[in-house]
Image: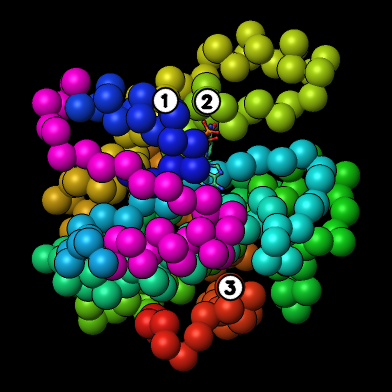
């Protein structure tokens, strides 16, 4: 399990160990919004693990309206939700290929539908992009996550690695912490009707362990079922351009694996 907050990571590890009776649970530090941290984490994994069976991209942030740059010059929400996972996937692809059946699972969101993506891709590092639409950076990040998953699945054809993405449902988690006061007061009772984290994890767990999906790749799941996506997010030409632009933005080198 890779986390940026080692205190909460330790708590989660201890809870899982106590319930599962499995002592072999290791926690490692990674800040997925930082390309340096992603590279350090990946190197540690490559040095210690021969095979990776599943890579789950779950970390995510939902900022309000605020674009802000990371030390790498990437917009923060996009760096956390998309660019970090894009880089990490490249750096860990070889041990995934060594698995009997490697799986990459991307936790996206149905809010992808509300993303503003231009065909010329001029806003994929949206440092100066402003929209009145709530959480537009989050929506954009979830849109490109789906594009990434489909392009990745095509590029992995002929290997034993699959890539799928999902909407987990609307869940009562920390993701809602940035709702501003006093809207947050009104929102609290609504939030209590959302799925519990356990319920929200079901589709992710299904894609991680179910034999039903061994042969399925490039799909979007809701409630453990393949679900239709809109046409806009499935544009193969834009997916390919996004891939190439992302390679440059995360500074992949000739020494890194190509997918
Ligand atoms: N909740 C929903 O209704 C909902 C709906 C659709 C999709 N999703 C997706 O579900 C995924 C999980 O979110 P959640 O709802 O469980 O929200 P959450 O409670 O806020 O969890 C997000 C997790 O991501 C971690 N994280 C954030 N930035 C990170 C970084 N730079 N490096 C490493 N870890 C980082 C957080 O770590 P810290 O503990 O350090 O903050 C936290 O553990 C996200 O991808 C989200 O977009 C959620």
| Residue at the (59%, 55%) spot, across then down | 33
Q: Which disc number belongs to residue 173?
A: 2
Q: Is mark 2 within 8 Å of ligand 1?
A: yes
Q: Relative to 4, say whether 229 is above or below.
A: below
Are the two marked residues, 3 and 1, in contact with CB atoms closer than 8 angstroms?
no
Residue 151 appears in the figure: yes
Numbered badge on residue 96? none
Q: Quadrant of residue 203?
A: top left
In the image, is residue 25 part of the stretch drawn in magenta? yes
Q: Secondary structure at mark 1?
A: helix
Q: Secondary structure at mark 2?
A: loop
Q: Nearer the viewer, residue 72 or 195?
A: 72
- Quarter of the rendering occupied by the C terminus: bottom left
Image location (x, y in percent) of residue 148: 50, 67
Q: Crowding near pointer 1: few (<14 within 10 Å), some, many (20+)? A: some
User: In the drawing, does residue 146 fall left or right of residue 129?
Assistant: left
Which residue lies at the image location 22% right of the left edge and 39% below the top edge? 25
Classify mark 2: residues with Cα within 10 Å, few (<14), some (14-19) or many (20+): some
User: Residue at position x 17%, y 67% from top?
Assistant: 50
Mark 2 or 1, nearer chain start: 2
Q: Which residue is mark 3?
A: 250
Mark carried by residue 197: 1
Q: Cβ(mark 1) to ligand 1 < 8 Å? A: yes
In the image, residue 176 lies at what x, y percent? 63, 28
The correct choice, above or below, for 189 with respect to 93 in the image is above
Check contact, mark 2 vs mark 1: CB within 8 A: yes
Question: What is the span of residues highlighted in magenta in the rendered image?
Answer: 18-46
Q: Which x, y percent locates residue 3?
A: 44, 42
């Amino acid at each position: 399990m890779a986390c940026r907050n080692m205190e909460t990571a330790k708590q989660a590890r201890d809870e899982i160990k106590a319930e599962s009776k499995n002592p072999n649970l290791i926690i490692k530090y990674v800040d997925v919004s930082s390309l340096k941290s992603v590279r350090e984490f990946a190197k540690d994994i490559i040095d210690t693990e021969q095979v990776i069976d599943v890579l789950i991209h779950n970390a995510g942030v939902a900022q309000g309206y605020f674009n802000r740059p990371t030390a790498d010059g990437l917009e923060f929400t996009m760096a956390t939700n998309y660019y970090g996972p894009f880089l990490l996937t490249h750096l860990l692809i070889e041990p995934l290929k060594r698995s009997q059946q490697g799986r990459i699972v991307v936790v996206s969101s149905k809010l992808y539908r509300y993303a503003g993506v231009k065909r010329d891709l001029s806003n994929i590092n949206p440092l100066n992009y402003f929209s009145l639409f709530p959480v537009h950076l989050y929506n954009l990040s979830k849109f490109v996550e789906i594009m990434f998953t489909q392009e990745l699945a095509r590029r992995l054809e002929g290997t034993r690695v699959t890539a799928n993405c999902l909407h987990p449902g609307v869940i009562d988690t920390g993701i809602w912490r940035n709702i501003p006061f006093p809207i947050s007061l009104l929102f609290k009772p609504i939030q209590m009707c959302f799925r519990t984290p356990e319920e929200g994890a079901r589709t992710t767990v299904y894609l991680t362990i179910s034999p039903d999906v061994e042969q399925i790749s490039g799909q979007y799941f809701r409630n453990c079922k393949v679900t239709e996506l809109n046409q806009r997010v499935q544009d193969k030409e834009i997916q390919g351009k996004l891939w190439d632009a992302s390679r440059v933005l995360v500074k992949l080198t000739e020494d890194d694996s190509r997918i």
